[in-house]
Every structure is written in C-alpha cells, then in structure tokens.
Amino acid sequence: MFGRCKRYVQAVALAAALAIPATATLAADQPDVEVVDPNTGALTLSFGVDFTNAYFFRGIGQENQGLLVQPWGTLAIALVDTDTFDLGISVGTWNSLHSGPTGTQDFGDFRTDPQLWYESDFIVSLDAVCGKFGASLIYTAYMSPNDSFETIQEIALKLKYDDSEMMGNFKLSPYVLIALELDDQADFGNSINGSTDTDEGVYLEIGIAPGFTLIESKTCPVTLSFPIVVGLSLSNYYEDTDDQDDDTFGYASVGVVASVPLPFPARFGAWTFSAGVTAVFLGDNTEDLSRFNGTGEEDLHIIGRVGISASY
C-alpha cells in the first residue's frame, strides 16, 4: 500500500512541477514505470533534468532558439497511509535555463543577471488518493530570475483516475486541471497594449496519456505513452494582443514518450531515461502571443525532449 502511495505522490508532485509547463517538457506525460523502490520511508526525493528545443507554456511560446535545460526537484511527504485513503504533501521547484535570446540578450536594462536563468517555479501540492481517484491542490509561483516577466501566482485543482487495472497492459490515465491566476497573468494580460484591464484568468486542461509496456522485462522494460492535452480558457486566460478578446481554445498537443529504467543499483535510487516528441497546435490568440514573444508565426510547433530522472 505504501509503495502505491509513494508512487502517486511522486507522480502528482512531478505533474505539479512540470506539467504546468507541460507542452515544454512532456515530463508530466511520462508513463509510470514500475521499478524497485529501495525507499520504504515517508520521504521521497525526486529530481531530474530535461533538454528540449522549445518551451511553450500552455501553448504560449516562451523560447524556441538555442538549448533549453530544465532541471527540477521535488520532496514528497506521505502524511496518511491506509488501505482506503492516502494523503501527502510535496514541495518542489522547476527551472528553465536558455541559451537563446530570452537568456542571453540584454534588451537594454530590461534583463538582469543571471541571464541564462529564465524561469524558476516554486510549487506546493497537497495530494490525496481514495481508491482509484486522486486529487491535488497545487500552489505555484512562476518567477523569472533574469526579470523576463513578473511573478505569476496560481492555485490549481487536478483530478485524475487510475485505470491501470481495467485494460491489462493498456491504460488511458485521464485527468482534468483547473487553474486560477491569483496575481499577474501568463498571457501578459491586456497590459501588453498599455491597458489597465489586467483581469487574472481561469484555465482548464483536459488530458489523457494512453500508454502500455512495449517491451516486457524485469530489469529494463520499455514503456510508451501517447499524451494528448487540450488547453482552454474559461475566463481571460488567452487574451489577444490586438483587440483584447479572450479565445476559448488555447492549444492542443499530441505526443509520444518512451521511458526506460536505468540499471543502477537500487541503493542509488530508481533512475529513468525518457525521450519524446510532441506536436503543439495553437489557437488564434496563442499563435498571436507566440509571435509577440518571438517564437514564430506558425500554428504548429514540434518539440523534442530527452531527460533523466531519479527518485529515492
């Protein structure tokens, strides 16, 4: 029972830390890989780093030039562990370092040192599991060490269902997430036009990650996942840069992710290598915002990623 609780807390904490920028890293869409867990305590430390060619935050382009390095870390604490109910809390950070323009160009006095450090997020998540249903209440502060954007604060509720036992080797892993901006806006608000109308937005995300074990192996199984995500604005989340209209459809993404545990001794924790490709389809306003941010005028973007992670 406790092993199941720990795996869930890790997955939710990782989704909180990375899935908020899910279209960038794909890490939130990685399938669960069953590995030998040497840690039987109430604390779980997870960390990793991803390398990608582009960063789109919920369909809003941030950077698509140079190398993007995105390290993260999470400490999960199991508070309650029973046969019917599990409760945990996690604290984590997610970061994005850019060698492209958002990390290296000064733009006068706009950007400060350390220039490469574009984003650093602080995440706290309260995670509960009851049977096959899971819920997470997530607070996130999106910060920019090089002053590329103002700090954005957000509270989100994520609901998910574990269907891993329903279809044998295949599962859908459905979830829904609703996020409410508390301070400032991911789309820069109408303030990009000099307007004083800067209402915070409400975001809705619906996703599944169909997956299965491609290669059955006790030591080195290969798991495939096909994450599909749709991001929508419930209110003021995807505002246009010209006429300030809110667009309901933000983006949709379809990807494929392969994961394989690395054959490290169990006393060093459970290590996983993953790689994936995602196609991101932008709505009218997110395409406009991406052009405003210098990430191109296309409504389709292909994002590749490789990463390594560990938990103990």
Image (cartoon, grey):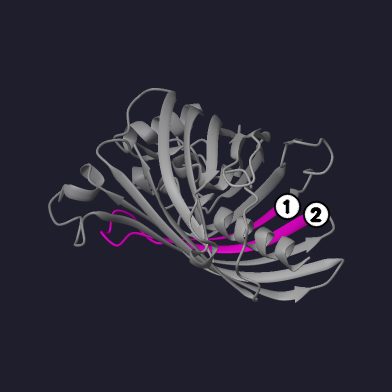
In the picture of the structure, the residue carrying the numbered disc 1 is 159
Which three-letter amino acid code belongs to the residue tagged 1?
Answer: Leu
- Return the x and y of residue 262 as percentages of the image width and height: 49, 49
Which residue reaches farthest left? 108
Residue at 60% across / 38% down in the picture?
223
| Label 2 secondary element | strand
In the image, which is nearer the foreground, mark 1 or mark 2?
Answer: 2
**Residues packed near mark 2 inside 10 Å, few (<14), some (14 to 19) or many (20 plus):** some
Q: Quadrant of residue 66?
A: top left
Residue 45 visible at all? yes
| Label 1 secondary element | strand
Residue 239 visible at all? no
- Return the x and y of residue 302 as percentages of the image width and height: 42, 27
Q: Please state, as top left, top right, bottom left or bottom right, where the N terminus lies in the image.
A: bottom right
Q: Is residue 118 magenta?
A: no
Tell which circle, 1 or 2, labels the residue nearer the N-terminal end. 2
50 relative to 222 in the view: left or right: left
Which three-letter amino acid code belongs to the residue tagged 2?
Answer: Phe
Label at residue 133: 2
Residue at 31% across / 45% down in the picture?
68
219 relative to 195 in the view: left or right: right
**Residues packed near mark 1 inside 10 Å, few (<14), some (14 to 19) or many (20 plus):** some
Q: Please state, as top left, top right, bottom left or bottom right, where the C terminus lies in the image.
A: bottom right
240 relative to 208 in the view: left or right: left
Question: Toward the viewer: 11 or 22?
Answer: 11
On screen, residue 245 above or below 102: above
Give the magenta range: 133-158
